[in-house]
Amino acid sequence: MRDEEREGAEPPDLELVQRGRTGDESALGALAKRHHAAAYRVALSLVRRDDLAQDVVQDAFLKAFRALGGFRADASFRTWLLTITANEARGALRRLGRRKETALEDVGEVATEELDPAQAAVVAEEAGRARMMLERLPEKQRLSVSLRIEEGLSFKEIGEVIGSSEGAARVNYFHGIRRLRELME
Amino acid sequence: MSDTTCGTVRELIPDFIGSRLAEEAVETVERHLAECGECRAELELAQMIFASRARAPEGLLDRVTRVTAESRRAPSRTWWGVSAAAVAALALGIGISSERAEMTVDVPGFAYEAEEGDVWSSDDGLIAGAPLFDGLSDESLLQLLDELSVGSPGGAA
């Protein structure tokens, strides 16, 4: 289950959006708390720099909250926000005049709390290698894999974020997975 | 061997990892995984990706909350303020259309409609071996999925 995005008994996004439209700051704060980490991962996957990714997330939330009145709930708030984030990230890269960094600066720590130290070291090393290989995939394959596995988005939602059809998102995902398995061998 | 196909299980692996599957589906996936090394390998890969996902930096949530709150509290420009700006711009020979364009919030409804060709300026096509799938028909995409040993959603592997 999503960690910080776990809803449980919390109000659903749509209710928070409706309250946010009326200026309910606690509702907007709850939306930010629930989705900022996913937005950060999408931004980081594209801009590959922590400081720039944080700027992108801030700008994406600013835009999303300003445009909340126009959100028609054709898709989930989460997909809408991640689409805005991806476009903000690409805009940031264009403004910088570059498309790629040579390496991702900040890869998250690997969750190995439940393992003994020896196992944890092996898992962390392998997971770190998988992450490095993931970063070598073409952009759409990389995002399709990340959005499906890390954020749990459907292929339809992934297609909306990356600007592709559902079918193309599915092919990007499975092509990326196959390529990753080849790279890991 | 269980009746469930590899294609079906591989579709479900991300939801299996994320605990988003109903109990019955979990049992189906577990039965298949017990018998299929290929799908177990894919599960392990997905688990590694999930485990190494980036965490949001400390302070990011506070920053987002603070900046968006400040933005809402900022006084909106009054009519005389706009008029003064327009007069000043005209006096300087500057059109105000460009300023207005920058101030526009370009997020209407769901679709984030950027200019044509601007929505995804991916350079995937510049990467050797990076395929582009967007222009393909559904039939071609299904054929590709078959070649990737996935098959159509829920269908044969």
Image: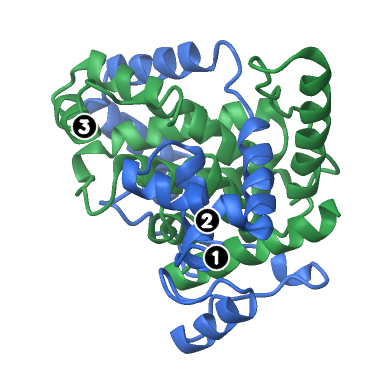
Chain colours: A green, B blue
Q: Residue at x 56, y 76 (%)?
A: B145
Q: Are marks 1 and 3 on the same chain?
A: no
Q: Residue at x 65, y 22 (%)?
A: A111
Q: Quadrant of residue B23?
A: top left
Label 3: few (<14), some (14–19) or many (≥20) C-alpha neighbours in 10 Å? many
Type of amino acid at the residue the image marks with label 2: His
> How far is disc 1 from disc 3 in space, using C-alphas?
39 Å
Q: Mark on residue B6?
A: 1
Residue A175: percent from the left, percent from the top? 65, 67
Nearest the eye: B93 or A134: A134
Type of amino acid at the residue the image marks with label 3: Val
Q: Mark 1–mark 3 contact, CB under 8 Å?
A: no
Q: Nearer the viewer, mark 2 or mark 3?
A: 2
Would residue B117 be visible to someone looking at this image? no
Would residue A155 be visible to someone looking at this image? yes
Q: Residue at x 38, y 40 (%)?
A: B20
The image shows a total of numbered marks equal to 3
Specify the subunit that label 3 lies on: A
Label 2: few (<14), some (14–19) or many (≥20) C-alpha neighbours in 10 Å? many
Quadrant in the picture for the N terminus of chain A = top left
Disc 1, SS: helix
Nearest the eye: A6 or A46: A6
Residue with the mark numbered 3: A17
> How far is disc 2 from disc 3 in space, using C-alphas?
40 Å
Q: Are marks 2 and 3 on the same chain?
A: no
Q: Mark 2–mark 1 contact, CB under 8 Å?
A: yes
Residue with the mark numbered 2: B32
Q: Nearer the viewer, mark 1 or mark 3?
A: 1
